[in-house]
Image (tube, grey):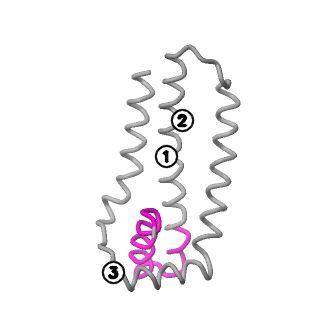
Amino acid sequence: MTTFDTLFFNLFNYYKTKNNKKANSIATFYITFLQCTLLLLLGVFFAGFFKQMHMDIMSADKAWIVFVLVVVFIYFKNWIQYSGRKRMVLNAKRIKNKKPTYNIWLLWLLPVAVLGLTYVVSKAA
């Protein structure tokens, strides 16, 4: 199991007890949001790096279009991966290994911290 799988199941199990019908949607949104913020951080870092190296690889408009397309791809990948049979198989593996659980507030603060780091990197470049 990957780190994202562990984070998904922590959120899924937390919201399953509170809001059973929307637990999968909330956890899928969280994982997608986290992966997209990490992708944005990586993109901002490389944009600043390429700017300092005086390289013109892609315009800003094209970069945002590529980012949006990748976000859509990530969402559908997560939707397919975490709904249905594969989620049940991963959950069975998780129950067997008994991974530690994380605080829900820290899980929700993680993407916010990544966005803050992205802002700092964008201002530093």
Q: Give the position of the N terminus as an image quadrant.
A: bottom left
Marker disc for residue 37? 1
Membership of 21 in magenta stretch: yes
Residue 98 location in percent, x, y? 33, 80
Residue that mark 2 sits on: 43
On the rendered image, what quadrant is the C terminus found in? top left
Q: Position of residue 75 (x, y in %)?
A: 62, 58
Q: Position of residue 31 (x, y in %)?
A: 50, 60
| Residue situated in front as seen by the camera: 92 or 15 | 92
**Residue 85 lies within the magenta run:** no
- Foreground: disc 1 or disc 3: 3
Distance between mark 1 and mark 3 Cα atoms: 28 Å
Question: Distance between the Cα atoms at labels 3 and 2?
Answer: 35 Å
> Residue at (43%, 75%) from the top-left corner?
15
Amino acid tagged 3: Lys
Q: Earlier in the sequence, mark 1 or mark 2?
A: 1
Q: Are marks 3 and 2 in contact (CB under 8 Å)?
A: no
Badge 1 amino acid = Thr
Depth check: 112 or 89 in front? Answer: 89
Secondary element at tag 2: helix
Tag 3 residue: 98
Classify residue 55 by image quadrant: top right
Eyeballing the image, is 113 above or below 96? above
Would residue 69 appear left or right of 124 to someone viewing this image?
Answer: right
Which secondary structure, mark 3?
A: loop
**Residue at coordinates 59% horizontally, 78% vertically from top-left?**
86
Do the CB atoms of the residues marked 1 and 3 lie less than 8 Å apart? no
Callout 1 secondary element: helix
Q: CA distance from mark 1 to mark 2?
A: 10 Å
Magenta stretch, residue numbers: 2-26
